[in-house]
Amino acid sequence: MNDLSRLSFNQMTSGKCGLGEVVDACVRRGVPWIGPWRHAMGDAPAEAGRLIREAGLWVSSLCRGGMFPGASAEERRRRIEDNLRAIDEAAAVGTDLLVLVNGPAPGRDIDGARQMVVDGIGEIVGYAEQCGVRLGVEPLHPMFAADRSVVVTMGEANGIAERFDSPWVGVVVDVYHVWWDPTVYMEIARAGKRIFAFHVSDWIVPTPDILMGRGMMGDGVIEIRRLRKAVEAAGYEGPIEVEIFNEALWARPVDEVVGLVAERFLEFV
Amino acid sequence: MNDLSRLSFNQMTSGKCGLGEVVDACVRRGVPWIGPWRHAMGDAPAEAGRLIREAGLWVSSLCRGGMFPGASAEERRRRIEDNLRAIDEAAAVGTDLLVLVNGPAPGRDIDGARQMVVDGIGEIVGYAEQCGVRLGVEPLHPMFAADRSVVVTMGEANGIAERFDSPWVGVVVDVYHVWWDPTVYMEIARAGKRIFAFHVSDWIVPTPDILMGRGMMGDGVIEIRRLRKAVEAAGYEGPIEVEIFNEALWARPVDEVVGLVAERFLEFV
């Protein structure tokens, strides 16, 4: 498993850097893939894509679409429109994958919000297909169920993907979000070719923060290699994206962070 | 549903008070049940039980046994011995229910640790039966998978209880730990008469702290009454324990806290 050819550096792992700096660091450290975020590309996704391509890198995915539930039909309509823009931006930056973080419930009705997610994907999948952009449903850790995503398990994400039964709707497996799940290996096998992306980081003990407490691979308790083997056994052969939200890491120089990511990728992923 | 006859006040909801103070507040506020913790009874569970009984209260459960996984056979043996003491203490304080918080993995092997939990329960269930103490397997929220419990879903807890298929092994449903789970209503129905306890609190947004961030019923997003109706439809008729770990609540006078719990219980549970 030991080379960097499948390593992708998610931009938010160096959250305070501009895209140009991250691209340069990836080039210097031999990391061939990058995962940009919409908010960091501003209004110029095509320009961001050109910058990345001209540096010789590829884009593994765009983060993020989703956030479908809303209290009113009008609010949900605005979310749909934002997702259509996100699909355009994915195509413009040069990736065929938009990661969906599906959003919290507007009130206490979590199952109602889950239905809004399914309805929302239904509204955008046709346009995604036209644009050649696949939609990756990412289950988030259940601790984000109230503020980021009502989709919190691989089982649920698989259920959504199976409902659409389309090559344009699949799942994103992020070890940080799913490692705790006693059904995770069964659900990875069930997902099979519907796995559109694989993200890695680590769960450190004690966790310093709910949102910003992710760890570098090897510093925590997740069986990362076991999970990698499982997604590969299921048929996944794409890039492996390192996505770590951690204030301490953000404070370090991007070149050092990309270097450490590459080193830990070879050792622990 | 509107009376206090099934309300139990878990002692840790006023975490800085002695048992006597909590008992007095429950009596004044008309709360008939109490849930003590082992560490707060010191070496005198029988005395604590007498104090509670003489005040006219009943004990809903004792927190907590469990913590089965250990790196060595010797370590696991010490955990078993501690659980046997916990069973004695449950009987001594006057309850037929010991809540099990099952413990984290000693390393990265979470499935191995899950097996240690099953093995550990197997070691103590005979003694529990002799003492007339039921064992309640409590799944914790997945955010505690690395430091408190490898048992993190109702499905997993049900699987353990079904393996034993004994009136002495069941599950504890705490809304805070299970509300996010898309399978929770199915798993509550599956648990049926194996539900030994029902705990309530709320999930507040944003969550102020991983361990100490629980909210008062009504202040958060959990569909508490829907979950109560589900456990009752499954056959549960026992006490409903309010267990809230929250620093801000700990800073308030116990009498006020018990009063607020009673009020919110009537309105939201």
Image (cartoon, coloured by chain):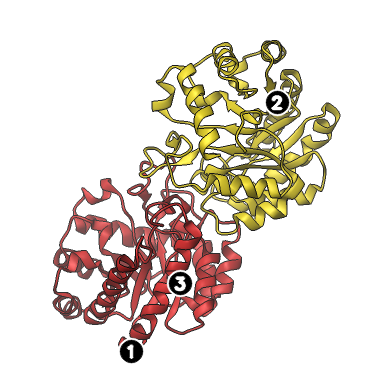
Chain colours: A red, B yellow
State whether residue B86 is above or below residue A85: above
Q: Which residue is mark 2?
A: B86
| Residue A225 coordinates in the image, percent (x, y) | 49, 62
Q: Quadrant of the N terminus of chain B?
A: top right
Determine which residue is flagged by label 1.
A130
Q: Earlier in the sequence, mark 3 or mark 1?
A: 3
Q: Foreground residue, A233 or B26?
A: B26
| Residue A118 disc label | 3
For mark 2, give the secondary structure: helix
The residues tagged by marks 2 and 3 sit, at their Cα atoms, a distance apart of 47 Å
Query: Are there few (<14), some (14-19), or many (20+) residues within 10 Å of tag 2?
Result: many
Left or right, A218 with reference to A27? right
Query: Mark 3 belongs to which subunit?
Result: A
Left or right of residue A2, residue B224 in this image = right
Alpha carbon separation for disc pair 3 and 1:
19 Å
Would residue A34 be seen by someone viewing this image from the given angle?
no
- Whether discs 2 and 3 lie on one chain: the answer is no
- Of tags 3 and 1, the one toward the viewer is 3
> Which chain is mark 2 on?
B
Looking at the rendered structure, the kind of residue marked 3 is Val
Q: A60 above or below B48?
A: below
The x and y percentages for residue A138 are 42, 66
* Residue B54 - label: none
Of labels 1 and 2, the one closer to you: 1
